[in-house]
Amino acid sequence: MHIPLPQFARRRLFEGHQRSIAAKQNMVALIVLRGASSIINLVLVPMTLAYLNTTRYGIWVTLSSVISWVALMDVGLGNGLRNELARAFALSDRVRARILISTTYVLIAVIICVLILLFHLINLYLAWDRILGTPSSMAQELSLLAEFVFAFFCFRLLFGLIGTILIADQKPALSSLFEVLSNFLSLGAVYILTKTIPGSLFWLGFSVAMLSAAVPLGGNFWYFLGRYKVYAPSFHFVQLRHARVLISIGVQFFMLQLAGVVIFASANLIITQLFGPDEVTPYNIAYRYYGFALAVFTTLLTPFWSAYTDAYTRGDMQWITMSLKKLTRAWGILVVLLVAMTLASEYLYALWIGHEVHVPLLISLFMASYVLIVAWSNIFAYFINGTGKIRLQLWIAAGTAVTMIPLALFLPRVWGLGSAGVILAICLSLLPGCVLWPIQVKQIIRGTAKGIWAR
């Protein structure tokens, strides 16, 4: 019997386990929101490229990726809050939830104040023209831009905690709304700049970084005066003894994030140093092109981290196993999508950004492989992260970070792969996790995990 689509959709979205219903509804909302964000980025990239030119665009991408390392400076407190808060929500413990939120806000506020002061002092002696391989005439402009971008990224670190709270409450779609709004406003800002100030790297960077902090700031006022009023940060609820719990797991997440920065964010810097800022642009174009597929898959995964925390806290292993099977089937669909994207890449690149920038096929092939490796690993890593048993991940990530940089320096020069060699180095470094994470997940679910597998 044929089922009308609206009725079928209602059955898919509103029937089943309550946790599954929430996950499916969030997926649909996330697909819409991230689809909108991707469309905005598709427009933003060529607009920014035309506004700055290829070289300045490469400089901006590299500078922003380097300064984005400030996201590490919460010492993992954000992810620690995410896990502990999800447990508090699962147990309906409102008081502990507010204590965790208040303590985290105060700790990160102190951290960013110290960071901004330290960076201001250090920035006086940094030669950004040498770091980014630019003409010395740009040194002063880059130094001033770095100062503002760093400060705004620090504030985004603090204000972005509202997104962490939403994710812990299994409402990741609402958290993703901040990204859409920020991208939309950035698009508007770049458009205004094209009409008012010709080719200014400083004003583009200032506007985009400022908006990335202003949007979550507005979110804090919106939610803490409304839905989360009972959880609003208060000095009265700050308890440093709970900070030990947050820091204990947070430091481990911090080390994972640090390894991730070395692996991913350093790629732009390595390419700049080896081949110049011009070569960052085709790498970044491919990263954004294939990043669309990774964003779609991450959309499917996003609701599961905190949902896994909830299920694991309640001992619901059956739901966890069922969810993992569905996600592995979704990965198979991702393979087909990436093959199609690679076959059509040359045509779609030209349609998207014109013929000003050429992206070699080898970069596309390795970037597609990178997306597949990351997506497969994350299927299992999200569950591991949700349980907080990340010690094995920590050791493997450290080994990956150590091996990636030598490979990234070796492959491009010795094998003549150019910037594609940097992507290949990342892929090779990430392969161990593809094998180890599924093994650890199986042991945790069966209750047989011991030693480092259970820590």
Image (cartoon, rainbow, N blue to C red):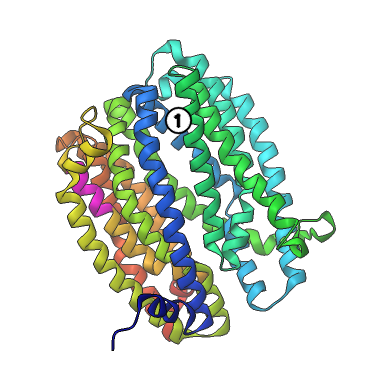
Residue bearing the label numbered 1:
63
From where the camera sits, is residue 392 visible? no
Left or right, residue 13 beside residue 348: right
Residue at position x 19%, y 45% from top?
345
In the figure, 287 relative to 83: above or below? above
Residue at position x 63%, y 77% from top?
90
Q: Is residue 369 magenta?
A: yes
From where the camera sits, is residue 379 visible? yes
Q: Residue furthest top?
A: 137
Q: Residue furthest bottom?
A: 1
Prevailing secondary structure of the magenta residues = helix
Residue at position x 67%, y 48% from top?
108
Q: Provide residue 347's location: percent of width, then percent of height.
A: 17, 41
Q: Residues within 10 Å of mark 1 (few under 14, many from 20)?
A: many
In the figure, 387 relative to 210: above or below? below
Along the viewing direction, whichever of 428 and 180 lies nearer the viewer = 180
Residue at position x 31%, y 72% from top?
328
Left or right, residue 289 beside residue 314: left
Q: Residue furthest right?
A: 236
Query: The N terminus appears in which quarter of the rendering?
Result: bottom left
* Residue 55, picture quadrant: top left
Q: Provide residue 243's location: percent of width, then percent of height.
A: 71, 59
For badge 1, the amino acid type reads Leu
User: Residues in magenta?
Assistant: 362-370
**Circle 1: element type:** helix
